[in-house]
Image (cartoon, helix red, strand yellow):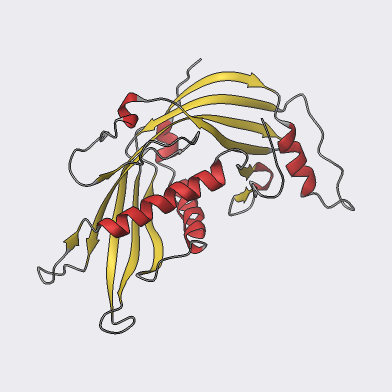
Amino acid sequence: MSFDIDWTKIESDAGLNESIKCHLNSYLQSIDLPDYVSNLRILDFSIGKVPPNIILREISDPLDDFYQALNEDIDIDNAKPVERNPNDVQFLTEIEYKGDLLITIAADLVLHYPTKSFMTLPVKLTISNVGIHSLCLIAYLSKQIFVSFLCDVSDSMLDKNESILDTSGSLLAPKRSLERILILRTMKIETEIGEQCQGEGSVLRSVGKLEQFLLENFKEVLRKELSWPSWINLDLSNNDDSNEDFAQRDPTSEDSSI
């Protein structure tokens, strides 16, 4: 069963875009950068006007793993364990996204010749043409939403590494893998190094080594935080707070199976 999403209400929500940007920036702070890159940060994030295609494959009760994760976080002295509720629900969905999501990232490129940190150049990267086609679990229980990607879905367009929206620029797509999930199947990165101000200065484009590093780290972050047995947990019980609470489950804390 497929259904439509009123994407206009989502893409026009500046607060949502800002929240996602802050969340991604927190991830970037935890990444070990190579010695030629520093101060990596996201300047702008736009979820885009093109919605994902979502097909509902199955409706069921949430997995036991989600309840166990909630109960592990409970203060035993002050709260009772989370139990199953008739309103709890879980959706198995197929998510296909080939939209116009846009991310602008800034960093400093450090040159270590003739001496260490001899020169620092500003770098700006524009990420677009993100391609995703995966099966995903979405569960609602105890006023919280759990999201976890299970596996990639065969997609002739993504598997052939074709550009989705724009044939210009550098399209970086991961090679075919024996692993069950990549999540991020394609991504285009346009890179500029240096500054142009009133016609002065020069810009270097398509810095392959930096682009490849960014692609690999984005793939790794997504797989680590979003693919089963990991998930992202959105706590809806704190809607009155100024910031939404995102929590991630550590996949190394215990073994899980589905």
Residue sitting at the far left: 199
Q: Residue at x 62, y 49 (%)?
A: 248
Residue 119 percent across, percent down from the top left: 27, 79
Q: Is residue 142 visible?
A: no
Q: Is residue 56 above or below residue 99?
A: above
How many labels, in total?
A: 0
Residue sitting at the far bottom: 115
Q: Residue at x 44, y 47 (%)?
A: 219
Q: Is residue 37 above or below residue 182?
A: below
Task: Name the foreground residue: 92 vs 243.
Answer: 92
Q: Residue at x 59, y 54 (%)?
A: 242
Q: Is residue 140 visible?
A: yes
Q: Is residue 169 left or right of residue 29?
A: left
Residue 221 percent across, percent down from the top left: 49, 50
Residue 2 percent across, percent down from the top left: 48, 17
Q: Quadrant of the C terminus?
A: top right
Residue 188 percent across, percent down from the top left: 29, 45
Residue sitting at the far front: 178
Residue sitting at the far right: 77
Q: Is residue 167 left or right of residue 249?
A: left
Q: Quadrant of residue 161?
A: top left
Q: Residue at x 16, y 69 (%)?
A: 197
